[in-house]
Amino acid sequence: MTVDDKDMSAQALPVGGAWCWFGDPRALHHEGRYKRTFVSYISDAGDIVIAQYDHGTGELSTSTLMDGFPKDDHNNPAICVRPDGRIMAFWTGHQYPGVPIYYRRSVLAEDITGGWEPVREITDNTSGDRPGFTYQNLAQLSREPGRLFVFWRGGNFNPTFSTSVDGETWTPATTLISAPGERPYVKVFSDGTDTIHFAFTQAHPNRVRTSIYYMYYRAGSLHRADGTPIGDLGAAIRPDQADLVYDAAAAGPKAWIWDIACDSAGRPILVYATFPSDTDHRYRYARWDNAGSWVDTEITAAGDSISADGNEPNYSGGISLDHANPSVVLLSRQEPGGRHEISRWTSTDQGASWDSVAITSNSRELNVRPLKPHGMRGDGALSVLWMAGEYPSYTSYQTRIMALGEDGMPFALCR
């Protein structure tokens, strides 16, 4: 693996690109001196890539942070913009022994084209029989100035975290959720002010009939949705201490979390998939209401897995929330007799019913894992991003990162 500091704005675009849905933010929109959107992915060659789109000029630039990394869509970087405007990117392997979390910081504020500081590493990890790191997630809160939270799956296969104020020194790796012998899958969303929301399973759905749980962090402590304290951050909690949003034991089908956001009042909203069978995926929408309970409805059937080799039968096409307006979701579902297509779904009655608009149609290839960049409001260029191509497996993907342009037409961020 080598490091590449070159700005690639005048060069050929990287070949191919992919991401997993458990490492975030993969895309974010920032308005400061410039109006820019940043997108991260791993290329077909295993290059760790950041793309930058300038909404004022329409210019697309890309920069490779490290090349020759193992080709695995779990290895996509997560990105954030620090209070000084500089971009930070974090990436790691898919539980590879001896591979730390790597990270770099841009030299210039709001700009990837001026180069990057040298690679740094987070090496401290929880101990266990699965050494290595996976699924970095980043969060920042204005009420905790300068503090950067990094969450990942640790050496004990459980969600883990560390924090830093200066981006150079880190607190000891600490287990967030403890499920001995299992591997919870967690989605993380920061409101940017004082709260970090978590939605998670207690295990992998290929091992256990998985349920969906929720909790939030605020001012040093973890809480259930109604505000009931669970404990201090740093004291690992069990899944059953959090809110049980979807109970697979009672409902029947297992589930997998896909995204989490909050509404304008700070109430959490989750989207996830259930599996009446491995070939029948269903998308659901759960929200915490004013009466103090979870309201959970089905959005639509999603079809079969995208995994062509059959080893990941619960890899749905994907669903995500518009974090600026979580009454809107982007999803990929298998059309009858066709491929997986992207559409935007909107609810005007808090998830009870939905209207949809197609973004792709009559495709000859898969269109999967759609998202809207964090921090972006409204529509326009890069308001929808997705993977297009074929997906033999997470280590042999043949996909590109696609985006909607200003004219509403798709274009590729990589070849």
Image (cartoon, rainbow, N blue to C red):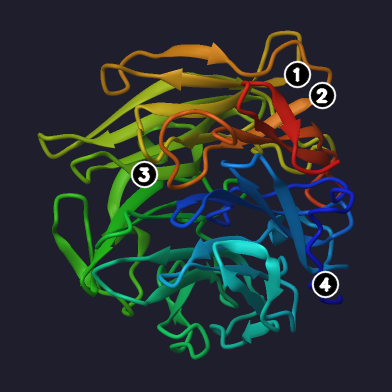
Q: Earlier in the sequence, mark 1 or mark 4?
A: 4
Residue 200 at x, y = what percent? 43, 52
Distance Cα–Cα, label 1 vs label 4: 36 Å
Residue 97 at x, y = what percent? 74, 80
CA neighbours of label 2 inside 10 A, class few (<14), some (14 to 19), many (20+)? some
CA neighbours of label 4 inside 10 A, class few (<14), some (14 to 19), many (20+)? some
Q: Which residue is located at x 52 percent, y 44 percent?
A: 373
Regarding mark 1 in the picture, which secondary structure is present there?
loop
Looking at the picture, tell me which residue is in the foreground, 65 or 160: 65
Tag shown at residue 327: none
Q: Which residue, given by chain and number where applicable, does mark 3 sit on? A: 261
Amino acid type of the residue that numbered disc 2 sits on in the rendered structure: Glu
Tag shown at residue 339: 1
Distance Cα–Cα, label 2 vs label 1: 6 Å
Q: Earlier in the sequence, mark 2 or mark 1?
A: 1
Asked if disc 1 and disc 3 are in contact, CB closer than 8 Å, the reply is no
Q: Which residue, given by chain and number where applicable, does mark 2 sit on? A: 365
Q: Which residue is located at x 83 percent, y 34 percent?
A: 308
Q: Earlier in the sequence, mark 4 or mark 2?
A: 4
Residue 321 at x, y = what percent? 44, 36
Q: Which residue, given by chain and number where applicable, does mark 4 sit on? A: 4
Asked if disc 2 and disc 1 are in contact, CB closer than 8 Å, the reply is yes
Q: Where, quadrant-wise, is the C terminus in this rendering?
A: top right
Distance Cα–Cα, label 1 vs label 3: 28 Å
Q: Which residue is located at x 82 percent, y 61 percent?
A: 47
Residue 237 at x, y = what percent? 33, 69
- The answer to whether residue 268 is left or right of residue 64 is left
Looking at the picture, tell me which residue is in the foreground, 254 or 187: 187
- The answer to whether residue 176 is left or right of residue 36 is left
Distance Cα–Cα, label 4 vs label 2: 32 Å
Establish if 130 lies above or below 111.
Answer: below
- The answer to whether residue 16 is left or right of residue 238 is right
